[in-house]
Amino acid sequence: MRRRSLGMMRVSAIGLGAMPLSIEGRPDEARALATVHAALDAGVTLLDTADSYHLPGGDPGHNERLLARALAAYGSIPDDVLVATKGGRGRPGGATDWTVDGDPRHLKSAAKASLRRLGVEAIGLYQLHKPDPRVPFEESVGALRDLLDAGVIRLAGVSNTDADQICRAHAILGDRLVSVQNRYSPAVGDSEPELRLAAELGLAFLPWSPLGGISRSSLERPAGARGGEPRFGAFHDIARERDVSPQRICLAWLLSRSPTVVPIPGATRPETVRDSAAAADLFLEPEEVARLEATVEQGRAPER
């Protein structure tokens, strides 16, 4: 599989977002383990998790423990597999009840708990899950610096941050800040400035929910869509021309956005993760990219 830089490491150009394996609608453990193993078989070396990926009100770390079991059961784990986890969020109650806690004491305690659950000597990549408006951002990032200095984590990243926060984190962590994880997809382009800044700083940009707007049906479209045309229809048109899934075209488009982009699509079935992984070696023609850019621009435009 094609590789991309993440700090001094080289990781697969397509990662696996493991959250769907532990939240509502999650598969049984056998299928979850088979999905992770299929990702590894396909050459995926970046596995993204978080301590808050569990059922509402459940025990923190379900997804981390699941990945640890999957890796233990796999056999010979490639040396370059990187498990990236996150701290600073929780799910204490209802489905939409996500809390934020960026207190340095909490982050340090959470990182050590993640370390134990993953069963590793040091966490490969630890990310601040979301800035806490109640805590000075520099204090939260300072916790990552302290964890780096203590050897609890090897690399640091930030998630759900704006451009100013990325610059402030970079000023504190220097080249030990290696990644930014924000929502970005055909449907959601709010993080375009952060994507460009990450490229300028040499940071990996990890889009979460990267397939937003790409429906399983080419006929699905939002209510009142202009002219009855499918939203982001070019993704489906090119998929038919290439005889691949529109999701694979979407991931290939994301890779074309910047050489530092590493999408982390979720999956709950082996066949889905294999299809996503194949996008790493799908190269779009300039004319195809132009068609996709045009449909994204149209699809994101507000209705009039």
Image: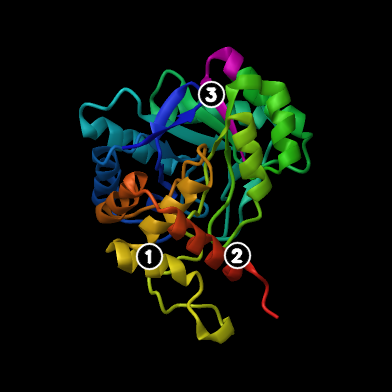
Q: Is residue 27 left or right of residue 189?
A: left
* Kind of residue at disc 3: Leu
Disc on res. 297:
2
Name the foreground residue: 142 vs 54: 142
Q: Which residues are magenta?
A: 148-159
Q: Is residue 96 left or right of residue 215?
A: right
Name the foreground residue: 38 vs 261: 261
View extreme (top): residue: 150
Whole-angstrom CA distance, mark 2 to mark 3, is 35 Å
> Residue under circle 3?
155
| Figure check: 232 above or below 192 | below
Q: Please rate how many residues cluster around mark 1, counting C-alpha atoms within 10 Å: few if below 14, some from 14 to 19, many from 20.
A: some
| Figure check: 162 above or below 123 | below
* Image quadrant where residue 235 sits: bottom left
Contact (CB < 8 A) between labels 2 and 1? no
Name the foreground residue: 286 vs 79: 286
